[in-house]
Image: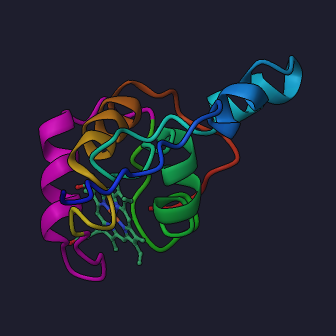
Amino acid sequence: MAQVPVRPVRGGLPAFLVLAGSGIAGGVLLASCSAPANGTATPREPEVIYDTTCGYCHGHNVGPIIRGRQLPAETIEFFVRNGSGAMPAFKPTEISPQELSALSEWISTSKADSTEHGQ
Ligand code: HEC
């Protein structure tokens, strides 16, 4: 009679379920771990992208002030994807489509920042 191999079945709770149940640590873990299953990174907040990627030119004499001017979101998206003069273009791998639409909306509706200076 032929022998049928029996595969061992793995048991036990996954570690993350145990961690998620442990109060504060679980909350932090869940909050910082919301990347969708398709592998794309968690979108960054518009303020974060502006401060790290746009604000060192815009508001610091390199580019024109763009906050508080109610620039249309489409205009902002166009400049970001295409660049202009001294401004580089940003690829979707650098600023995702989702991040760009949130960023453009945020800049478009943001108030002028009196600490910024520029043309
Ligand atoms: C290396 C410096 C630099 C960086 C970084 C940069 N810009 Fe610019 N940006 C410029 C310059 C310079 C201009 C003016 C270009 C021109 O006159 O052709 C400009 C123009 C623009 C304009 C058009 C403004 C107008 O009054 O017509 C928008 C909108 C804009 N940038 C958005 C952004 C956003 C959003 C980011 C971040 C994702 C960004 N820029 C990053 C330098 C930069």
Whether residue 81 appears in magenta in the rendering, the answer is yes
In the displayed orientation, state which residue is furthest to the bottom.
86
In percent of width and height, residue 106 lies at: 40, 31
Residue 23 placement: quadrant: top right
Q: Quick check: 107 above or below 39?
A: above
Residue 113 placement: quadrant: top right
Classify residue 106 as left or right of residue 5: right
Residue at 33% x, 67% y: name it.
94
In percent of width and height, residue 69 lies at: 36, 34
Quadrant location, the N terminus: bottom left
Q: Nearer the viewer, residue 85 or 23?
A: 23
Whether residue 72 appears in magenta in the rendering, the answer is yes
Quadrant location, the C terminus: bottom left
Q: Quick check: 106 above or below 63?
A: above
Q: Nearer the viewer, residue 38 or 108?
A: 38
Q: Quick check: 87 above or below 109?
A: below
Q: Nearer the viewer, residue 73 or 93?
A: 93
Q: Which residues are magenta?
A: 68-90
Classify residue 1 as left or right of residue 34: left
Classify residue 94 as left or right of residue 117: left
In percent of width and height, residue 37 lies at: 33, 41
Ligand 1: image quarter: bottom left
In percent of width and height, residue 108 lies at: 33, 31
Residue at 58% x, 39% y: name it.
33
Q: Nearer the viewer, residue 14 or 64?
A: 14
